[in-house]
């Protein structure tokens, strides 16, 4: 808790540009064993904070999504992933991992978008995005939720986070795709319903060339919705996404996969890794 609180407070001091700092709240729910820690500010928000270093961050959705990835900070220039100090830009990523690996949750909101992240019982990470129907939040807020009985050995957990971060510096393919567990219902989203051409590799290639790559080139928010698709084959995913991973632009800010089952998700990760090796 101390580690996470310090990291969140540091973000307020370094990035919020708030003249009055931030507000902290902490609650322990004795009946459920849940611990909630909230840090909020009414500063400039994530979009403004990140956009000076990453001009492609032009929406709150992109800002919230991008801020949760490792080696991302408003103090770095765009594309500087491999030239930064080992632990730079890792605060929110570490907190996200601490929460999800302890079967807890993490909420990060700014402007009109909030990311809701949780840890599943099988150790995987669940994620969805919520858009405010009115108003939103002027600055940035973060809520860390931990389960007392699930919090493991901190040194071991932090070591795991650092190992992941070190690997990401060598290969970012693991974080190119933003996997979410529910359909995306955000403004300005271009959605491709994969079920409509399931296992049709010719149509997949056509959609890739005519829809996916041009949308990414234009920095549009693109969702590949796998609702109803069960265990997509490697050849189908390769036809649909290999060139996207190899040649596509703005993947880390614009490409999202929704409602993919575990087998399909692993196939997508494998194609992304393969494309990264070939491209590298």
Image (tube, rainbow, N blue to C red):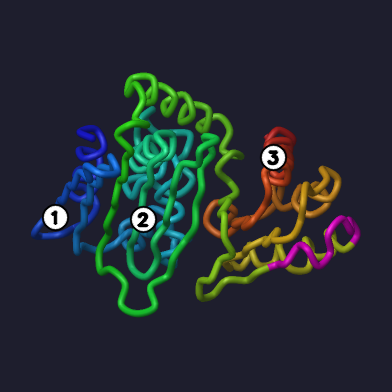
Residue at left offset 28%, top offset 39%: 33
Given residues 253 and 232, the one toward you in this image is 232
Q: Quadrant of the C terminus?
A: top right
- Crowd around label 2: few <14 · some 14–19 · many ≥20 (10 Å): many
- Crowd around label 1: few <14 · some 14–19 · many ≥20 (10 Å): few
Which mark, residue 43? none
Examine the rendered structure and indicate whether residue 135 appears above or below residue 201.
below
Q: Position of residue 272 (x, y in %)?
A: 69, 42
Q: Is residue 228 left or right of residue 68?
A: right
Give, as a single range, the part of the protein colored magenta.
192-202
Given residues 8 and 104, the one toward you in this image is 104
The secondary element bearing badge 1 is classed as: strand
Q: Which residue is mark 3?
A: 266
Q: Is residue 204 left or right of residue 90?
A: right
Magenta run includes residue 246:
no
Front of the two marks 3 and 2: 3
Distance CA(mark 3)–CA(mark 2): 30 Å
Residue 226, quarter of picture: bottom right
Q: Is residue 109 left or right of residue 258?
A: left
Q: Position of residue 138 (x, y in %)?
A: 25, 69
Residue 83, quarter of picture: top left
Farthest residue to the front: give it.
Answer: 31
Distance CA(mark 3)–CA(mark 1): 40 Å
First in sequence: mark 3 vs mark 1? 1
Q: Which residue is mark 2?
A: 50
Q: Position of residue 43 (x, y in %)?
A: 20, 62
Given residues 264 and 43, the one toward you in this image is 264
Residue at left offset 55%, top offset 35%: 122
Examine the rendered structure and indicate whether residue 126 appears above or below residue 137.
above
Which mark, residue 23? 1
Farthest residue to the bottom: give it.
Answer: 134
Distance CA(mark 1)–CA(mark 2): 21 Å
């Amino acid at each position: 808790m101390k580690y996470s609180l310090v990291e969140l407070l540091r973000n307020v001091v370094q990035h919020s540009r708030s003249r009055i700092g931030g507000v902290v709240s902490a609650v322990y729910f004795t009946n459920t064993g849940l611990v909630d820690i909230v840090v909020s500010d009414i500063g400039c928000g994530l979009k403004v904070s990140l956009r000076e270093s990453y001009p492609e961050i032009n929406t709150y959705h992109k800002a919230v999504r991008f801020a949760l990835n490792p080696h991302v900070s408003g103090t770095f220039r765009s594309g500087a992933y491999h030239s930064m100090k080992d632990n730079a830009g890792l605060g929110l990523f570490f907190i996200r991992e601490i929460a999800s690996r302890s079967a807890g949750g993490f909420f990060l909101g700014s402007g009109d978008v909030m990311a809701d992240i949780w840890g599943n019982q099988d150790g995987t990470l669940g994620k969805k995005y919520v858009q405010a129907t009115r108003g939103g939040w002027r600055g940035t807020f973060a809520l860390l939720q931990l389960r007392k009985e699930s919090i493991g050995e901190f040194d071991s957990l932090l070591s795991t986070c650092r190992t992941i971060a070190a690997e990401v510096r060598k290969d970012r393919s693991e974080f190119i795709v933003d996997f979410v567990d529910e359909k995306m219902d955000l403004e300005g989203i271009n959605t491709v319903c994969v079920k409509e051409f399931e296992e049709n590799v010719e149509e997949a290639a056509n959609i890739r060339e005519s829809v996916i790559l041009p949308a990414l080139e234009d920095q549009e928010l693109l969702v590949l919705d796998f609702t109803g698709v069960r265990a997509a084959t490697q050849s189908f995913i390769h036809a649909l996404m290999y060139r996207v991973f190899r040649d596509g632009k703005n993947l880390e800010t614009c490409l999202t996969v929704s409602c993919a089952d575990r087998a399909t998700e692993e196939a997508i990760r494998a194609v992304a890794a393969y494309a990264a090796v070939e491209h590298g």
